[in-house]
Image: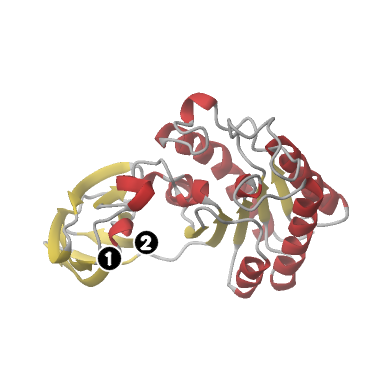
Amino acid sequence: MRLEWVGEAESVEIAYRTETDELGFRGPGAGRVFTLLRGEHVVAEAEARLGEASVRLPAGRGPERAILHLPEGMRPTLLGLRAHGGEIAPAPRGPRWLCYGDSIVEGWKASGPAWAWPARVARRHGLDVVNLGYAGAARGELASAEEIAAQDADLITLAHGTNCWARTPHGAALFAEGLRAFLALVREGHPATPIVALSPILRLDAETKPNRLGATLADLRRAFERVIEERSAAGDAHLVLVPGRELVPAAELPDGIHPDDAGHARLARTLGPILAAQLSSAAAPSR
């Protein structure tokens, strides 16, 4: 949830209403502040209040678009936006990126929504990210595949698997077949859209411990990577695998599962150039 604009103003005033200050297991990282950035520079931050209120933030100046991340965890409704000391206009829309995954995609353990890896990549590369991160879920549900297939997209990423080890356990064969079906449905709606598939990152309690169906996370990761490699080899030229095991070190997983700000920044540095390259390749004229 964010606003993006171009133009110069001394400040912006946001009228809003929030519904709750109970942020649940995710805590303040769910978002309880307004964060205004230009590029990766934080121009201003302000705490949100419960109920109906307004906040005024210095808008900063410079060639980069302004991006205002909202206090998502408090379920805000925007009631108005007003510029003071200048004019602003909606920023041009960038390539539309559907980013499917679990709580790691959603941004758990990042200190706020602005610092989850999809938000970082979107700012750096000018993407219009739609964060389809589902905490506690994202097991390759076919309903989600159908939703993705029906939406406009210039780029798609898939990053799931850790919740298939626990909660609703999968064996490796079941996980592989589910991923094959998921990809088949997505490709019905997006036959040539770039898809970048990120296999599960390190999870400390799951790498070598079998779940109730006998699969370790290492087993599920191998199944994920094998399916992507097989489909690519069979002719899906716009499907790219990024192996996840070594992307985030244990020191940047404070609960053994979710990256902290440093881990999300590391993911963004690795994945951002890959996503940008896939967009550029898709846009290049065929010879």
Q: Quadrant of residue 50?
A: bottom left
Residue 91 visible from this viewpoint: yes
Give the left or right position of residue 248, taking residue 219 as reference. Answer: left
Give the camera-side residue of 195 and 136.
136
Instruction: Give the farthest residue toward the front.
Output: 212
Residue 212, x across and y down, in percent = 70, 44
Give the camera-side residue of 1 and 72.
72
Q: Disc 1 or 2, which lies upstream in sequence?
A: 2
| Disc number lying in front (1 or 2) | 1
Instruction: From the image, tell me which residue sits under label 1.
Output: 76
In the rendered structure, are the residues bearing label 1 and label 2 in contact, judged by CB atoms less than 8 Å apart?
yes
Q: Quadrant of residue 234?
A: bottom right
**Which amino acid type corresponds to the residue marked 2 in the rendered image?**
Met
Give the left or right position of residue 210, taking residue 22 as reference. Answer: right
Q: Residues within 10 Å of mark 2 (few under 14, many from 20)?
A: some
Q: Which mark is residue 1?
A: 2
Q: CA distance from mark 1 to mark 2?
A: 9 Å
Q: Residues within 10 Å of mark 1 (few under 14, many from 20)?
A: many
Looking at the rendered structure, the secondary structure element under dot 1 is loop
Q: Is residue 256 above or below residue 194?
A: above
**Which amino acid type corresponds to the residue marked 1 in the rendered image?**
Pro
Residue at image coords 58%, 73%: 151
Instruction: Give the farthest residue toward the top.
Output: 251
Residue 197, x across and y down, in percent = 67, 49
